[in-house]
Amino acid sequence: MAPLRLRVLAAECALDRPVRWVAVSELEDPTPFLEGDELVLTIGMRLGAQDAQPYISRLVARGVAGLGFGVGLGHDRVPPEFTEVAARAGLPLVEVPRETPFIAVGKAVSELLAAERYDELSNALAAQGRLTRAALQTGGRKAVVERLAKEIHGWAVLLDESGAVLHTAGEGAVEGAGLVQEDLERLRAPGSPASLALSGPYEHVIVQPLGDQRRVRGFFAVGSGRSFSPVGHTVVNTANSLLTLSLEQGRDQLAAVRRVRSAVLSLLLAGDRRAAEETAEMVGGGLPTGPLVVLACEPRDADELLDTLPGFAAPWGTLVVVLAEAERADHLAGMAATAGRVGISGPAELAGLPTALDQANRALASAAPVMRFSDLAGQGLLSLVDPGLLSGFATSLLAPLREYGSRADLVESLRAYLACNGHWDAAAQRLGVHRHTLRYRMRRVGELLGRDLDDPAARAELWIALSAGGPPGPAPGDRDR
């Protein structure tokens, strides 16, 4: 500013305001032609002392950054009324001497803006480089989150697709993770926005999904005590791209590992243990040693279960097969049961894997949420019947109930009724419905099946069909309350 020989007359403490342009005007009210953040230059050709208050008030209301008053033409000096009003309003006022043309002030501001823009672009490129190097490190996702928090001088959080926190960095990250949880559903919904911006008096937050439009792979959120500049948005978007790429690459690697494990399972079932062990070692993590137990799982989401279970788990058709050391079987079965039905074999060696897998499949066919093959003995002759024939019998017998058009789940109602030995109150309580509702349903079951539910033989036949008829329907009480 020294070569321009400008002199600050008022509000020197506000000189740090951003200036986005220079506007020269001799209008009594130039504000209709302004956008805000301008440095307004005037020689006051149409302004007198009485105009100081209304003129400066209009500039302040418009968001002008400052006022430059040229002297030596319309006024020999800046009218003191303008200085006083500007000081009270907090609007920077500078005196522009006659020998300093307004165009020189405009050029100076233009050069400063160009330099500022260059610095912004340079800073953005430098930040992108630092984030990229962080992504290439071991544990790249965590490194990107930590680097991002430093770049924005705030906090950053990475969450998985369910909203669980994976990594945090920066002061306030834990609180920020809790803050954005309720907003994640807005980003999951069809036609959702590409990101969310949340602003408060002391914090500015951006939440973005990771992945593509077909499936959200996770989320990340950032927060800062100051609003995000264009450079800040560029840095955040770069982090989004790097985190998304990392997640997608991780998915591809997981898919490859799963294909290899399926091949390992095929080799074991074919009796080629040596090749199976060598192949398993290629993807890390060997096979269980000593007695093992086979879990046959029918999850609602196979990918989700495979991501969750530790140890050797492989996709097998529509199922997920787990080879577990005997002492860990209960723990893994509990984890798998949260995702769907589980059948558990008896103890076996790797050489006996075909038999153990058959046992697990037989246990899974019982339709119980979790069934051990050893517990099938409690089902009497059912364990001796060919599963295919039994399943066909059950499907045919129960088909009228499964095809029934009402919202009431007749299959589960029948199951509860038979399990409670025909006691209406106990069965109704188990289903979460009134006993009169259950009586109506049982009459309808009898009509659809053409069987007398008071006949012990009919009850036994239906119980066998329910025990082998596949997975149960919705949980009791979820329908027709």
Image (cartoon, rainbow, N blue to C red):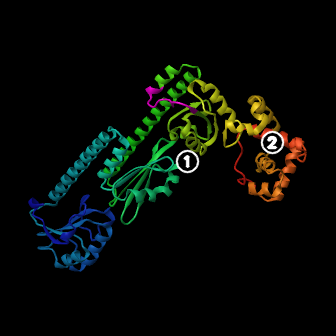
- Please provide percent x and percent y for residue 275: 49, 20
In the displayed structure, 210 sits above or below 425; it is above
At label 1, counting other C-alpha atoms closer than 10 Å, the crowd grade (few under 14, some 14-19, many 20 or more) is few
Please, what is the three-letter code of the amino acid marked with disc 1?
Answer: Pro
At label 2, counting other C-alpha atoms closer than 10 Å, the crowd grade (few under 14, some 14-19, many 20 or more) is some
Q: Secondary structure at mark 2?
A: helix
Q: Secondary structure at mark 1?
A: loop
**Residue corresponding to mark 2:** 463
Of mark 2 and mark 1, the one earlier in the sequence is 1
Residue beneath the point at 46% across and 48% down: 194
- Please provide percent x and percent y for residue 362: 69, 33
Please, what is the three-letter code of the amino acid marked with disc 2?
Answer: Trp
- Please provide percent x and percent y for residue 350: 56, 26
- Which segment did they paint magenta? 280-292
In the displayed structure, 200 sits above or below 475; it is below
Which is nearer the eye, 104 or 174? 174
Q: Is residue 288 magenta?
A: yes
Q: Is residue 385 left or right of residue 261?
A: right
Residue 336 - label:
none
In the displayed structure, 163 sits above or below 261; it is below
**Residue corresponding to mark 1:** 190
**Is residue 51 shown to the viewer in this render?**
no
Q: Is residue 40 left or right of residue 277?
A: left
Q: Nearer the viewer, mark 2 or mark 1?
A: 2
**Is residue 318 shown to the viewer in this render?**
yes
- Please provide percent x and percent y for residue 179: 45, 59
